[in-house]
Each structure stands twice: as C-alpha cells, then as structure tokens.
Image (cartoon, rainbow, N blue to C red):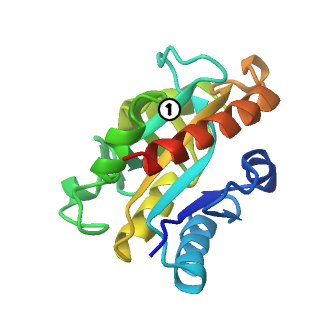
Amino acid sequence: MSRRILIVTAVQAEADAIGRPSGTFVVAGGIGRTNAAAATTAAILSDGPFTWVLNAGVAGSLPNSNLSLGEIVVANACIYAEEGLQTPDGFQNMQEMGLSLGNFEGNEVPVDSWMLERLSNIGIAAPIATVVTCSGSNAQAKLVQERTGCLCEAMEGAAVVHAAKRVGAPAIEIRVISNTTGDRENQEWDFELALNVLNKAVDASIHALWSE
C-alpha cells in the first residue's frame, strides 16, 4: 500500500499555503476542536487509510517562550487547556479530577513517538496548548502558559491528534508562530511570514516522514 499523509488545517489560507503535495490529502477542517475532530475523523473514514496524520497551521506564542515570529514548533505533546475543574483553590485537570479523556493521562494527548523523532529537527520540539478561547489579554496568556507549560497556543491540535489516535492513525501537530499573545494592542503579527514558513515546514515534514 502506498504511503499517504492526511494534513488537517483550520482555515483555507493555511491549506492554500501548503498546496497539494504529492501523496497528501489536505483538508481545511474549520476552526476549533469540534471542527478539527470531525474533519479528521471524516477524512480518515471516507478518504483513508492514511499512513500519518499531520495537523499543520499557525499559532500564537505564549509568555516567556522566546519564540520569534516565523519560528516552527513541533509538538511533543498536545495539551487541552480548558478540560477540568476550576475551584477556589485553583484549576484541576482531568487526571487530578480522577477522570479520563481517553487512553492517555490527564489533558496531555501524546503524539506519535516515531513521527516526533523524524520531525524534531525541523523546529523546536515542545508542548502546544489547544485552547477554546485565544489569549487576547496578558492575564489569559499567563494563565494558559502556567496551566499547560506550553510555548504556544492554537485551537485544533489536541483534537486532531486525539481523533486520529482513536482510530489508530499516527499523528502529530506542527505550528508556525504567526503572532504573540497577550493584550491585543501590544500583539505582534506577521501572518504572511508564517504562511510562507508553513509551506516549507510541511514540505520538510513530508520529506522527513518519507525518508528511510
């Protein structure tokens, strides 16, 4: 069976930046976790099987990450930022609540270890937060960083990797920094740069996965 890669983005601009590399099936699944999980599952069931699943797109850097605009981050874990319980004493994740989101611990969806090994030299290997609410204030950005320990945030990665994991498809998330987080009036943005780098990052990922 020939090797094929499913690439899931959030928006069409990301999909257009990636193009249609040979041996890939690119889906702009929509923004947010529900769209991401549904699009991933639908693509695998209707257009699969796929050898690998890649969630690719842009992200916002979190405080003290030392990430520059245009920098590539390869997820060594995808962290759900909101699932849990907010108490007067602080936030409890799913593991601390004694509950489970799947066959993994707490809020951390593991990426495929073989894919991570192959892609880790393309950018910085670090955990990426999957959020429902993007950080448009310093307080929110600090909250996400402290809660998850992540370097950047996006809205789909954990859901794509989680959905792929449920059907046994190896998956990982790769992001390019398009903006800083924090107070909106102080944010820095370069979406065009991030999309240009995204094209190169995905090409490098495909070559790394296909190389023996």
| Crowding at mark 1 (Cα within 10 Å: few <14, some 14-19, many 20+) | many
Residue 51 spot, x, y in % from top left: 44, 66
Residue at 37% across / 48% down in the picture? Answer: 115
Residue at 62% across / 62% down in the picture? Answer: 24
- Can residue 210 be seen here? The reply is yes
Residue 16 spot, x, y in % from top left: 80, 51
Residue 117: quarter of image: top left
Give whichever of 16, 206 is nearer the camera: 206
Residue 134 placement, left or right of 194: left
Q: Secondary structure at mark 1?
A: strand
Residue at 56% across / 37% down in the picture? Answer: 204
Q: Which residue is mark 1?
A: 73
Give whichever of 14, 25 is nearer the camera: 25
Q: Indicate the quadrant containing the N terminus: top left, top right, bottom left or bottom right.
A: bottom left
Residue 33 placement, left or right of 21: left
Give whichever of 174, 132 is nearer the camera: 174
Image height check: is 69 above or below 157?
Answer: above
Residue at 39% across / 69% down in the picture? Answer: 169
Residue 68 spot, x, y in % from top left: 60, 16
Residue 27: quarter of image: bottom right
